[in-house]
């Protein structure tokens, strides 16, 4: 059975209005099946960022860097913002890809003006 972890790393702990944020995505397969991830979205209250350039397959016991993307922080945002990470993940079981859709909640800190 599949067991995986999605890892993402922001280039800074906080951002100011108008700055560009950069985030790198990784997937780690901890089970004994192949995992494929695609259709990654960062969903904020101020907008959704579809990250169509990042996807990939990882084998059992492997970690794969999926890629990096950048997003612009709107000039109207202040304080702490929550976001969801949403993605399609497939597990390869018995010669068949099985779709699993997951969302994770996290906090993201902006500079307060």
Image (spheres, rainbow, N blue to C red):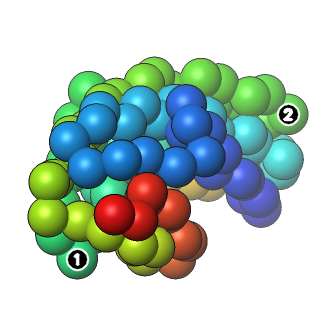
Residue at numbered disc 2: 61
Taking the spot 43% from the left edge, 59% from the top edge, the residue there is 110
Taking the spot 42% from the left edge, 24% from the top edge, the residue there is 68
Query: x, y (%) of residue 78?
Result: 31, 68
- Between 21 and 62, the residue placed more toward the observer is 21
Residue 29 to residue 78: above or below: above
In the picture as drawn, the residue positioned furthest to the front comes out as: 113
Query: x, y (%) of residue 100?
Result: 46, 68
Image-quadrant location for residue 42: bottom left
Which numbered marker is on residue 107?
none
- Between 38 and 109, the residue placed more toward the observer is 109
Look at discs 1 and 2 and give the one toward the viewer: 1
Residue 69 to residue 103: above or below: above
Q: Earlier in the sequence, mark 1 or mark 2?
A: 1
Query: x, y (%) of residue 1?
Result: 77, 61
Taking the spot 52% from the left edge, 49% from the top edge, the residue there is 14
Taking the spot 65% from the left edge, 25% from the top edge, the residue there is 64
Residue 106 to residue 17: above or below: below
Q: Rounded to the nearest whole Å, what is the CA distance between mark 1 and mark 2?
A: 35 Å
Figure disc tally = 2
- Between 86 and 106, the residue placed more toward the observer is 106
Secondary structure found at label 1: loop
Residue at numbered disc 1: 45
Secondary structure found at label 2: loop
The quadrant of the picture occupied by the C terminus is bottom left
Is residue 56 left or right of 51 when viewed as pictured? Answer: right
Can residue 54 be seen in the rendering of this structure? no
Q: Residues within 10 Å of mark 2 (few under 14, many from 20)?
A: some
Query: x, y (%) of residue 71?
Result: 25, 38
Image-quadrant location for residue 55: top left
Q: Are marks 1 and 2 in contact (CB under 8 Å)?
A: no
Residue 45 to residue 69: above or below: below
């Amino acid at each position: 059975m599949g067991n995986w972890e999605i890892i993402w790393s922001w280039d800074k702990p906080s951002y100011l209005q108008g700055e560009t944020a950069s985030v790198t995505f990784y997937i780690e397969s901890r089970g004994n099946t192949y995992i494929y991830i695609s259709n990654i979205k960062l969903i904020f209250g101020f907008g959704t960022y579809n990250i169509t350039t990042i996807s990939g397959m990882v084998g059992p016991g492997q970690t794969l860097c999926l890629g990096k993307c950048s997003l612009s922080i709107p000039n109207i945002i202040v304080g702490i913002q929550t976001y969801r990470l949403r993605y399609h993940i497939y597990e390869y079981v018995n010669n068949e890809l099985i779709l699993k859709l997951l969302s994770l909640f996290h906090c993201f800190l902006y500079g307060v003006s």
